[in-house]
Amino acid sequence: MPYATINGTELYYESSGSGTPIVFIHPPLLTSANFKYQQAQLSSGCRVVTFDIRGHGRSRPSEAPVTYELIVKDLKQLLNHLGIEKAFVAGYSTGGSIALEALLTYPALFAGGILISAMSEASDFVLRNRIRIAIGLSGWKPAIGLLRLGITWGNADSRATFRNLLNDSKSGNKRNIRQYYKYSLQYRCTERLPEIAAPVLLLYGDKDWGFKRYKKILRQGLPNSKLVIFRTVKHQLPTKAADGLNEAISRFVAEVAKENRKAADEAAGIMEVIQEAYVVDPEFHEERPHH
């Protein structure tokens, strides 16, 4: 099993495939197992990196409180450990907020963002209440089992997926899970969205009623975004709309790569013209005035 000691904590990660790197970030309580379909399908043309956030799944518990800033630092160091100089950052649900924080903190490290059922803030009563309930349940050992059942069952597309998600979630540290939930209540980067120049793909289910406001916020705030809506799907796109999701991600990554190559070619052409303009004729001799 691949582990790396990142900022003093041993993190579990997986890297599969080759090509343009995409790193995925999971929400609280869930683990990198939530991206099994992305690993399986996208790795044929991309390098897919997944990892368990500290205190989740097979990663070791964190002595330091889990914050988005710390997770982003871990992400940067993990990419450095893997020798990845530039990647797309993809976040699901609350993990999308961390993807936004990564784009804001280390813009040179990321070619673009992929936000799956994501938000830049948790500002409506229903979502905040759900998070508060999760905070309460995750802080009490007998109750966190109910939270695990609800979250993993809600994200499962089959009994096999449910067992896999549930078993992985049982290894998590309840204190770190609670910290992750608590931080999502206070995090807000909506006012800073215009600072993100990188292209961002927004992916939502048309039945994800509670996140329609967040879809609108991101669409209006991000200067370079593309929106894809999946019909008859709710929130859990990585597992319940995997084929369409992966196709949209592949297409987006290819489009951005093509645009970057075009921009690089144009820049190279401009530099060539500039250099030619300053070529000195070897037969040319400047005559200096005699004094």
Image: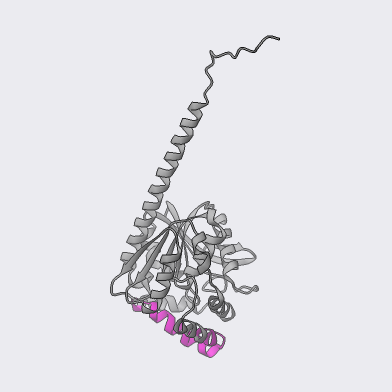
Say if residue 203 shows up in the picture.
yes
| Residue 277 horizontal/vertical position (percent) | 49, 27
The image quarter in which residue 136 lies: bottom right
Q: Which residues are magenta?
A: 134-159
The image quarter in which residue 162 lies: bottom left
List the single residue furthest toward the right: 291
| Residue 39 horizontal/vertical position (percent) | 40, 63
- Is 224 included in the stretch rendered in magenta? no
| Residue 90 horizontal/vertical position (percent) | 45, 63
List the single residue furthest toward the front: 291
Q: Residue at x 59, y 63 (%)?
A: 73
Picture layout, residue 6 above or below residue 28 = above
Front one among 216 and 268: 216
Q: Residue at x 31, y 65 (%)?
A: 244
List the single residue furthest toward the top: 290
Front one among 267 and 30: 267
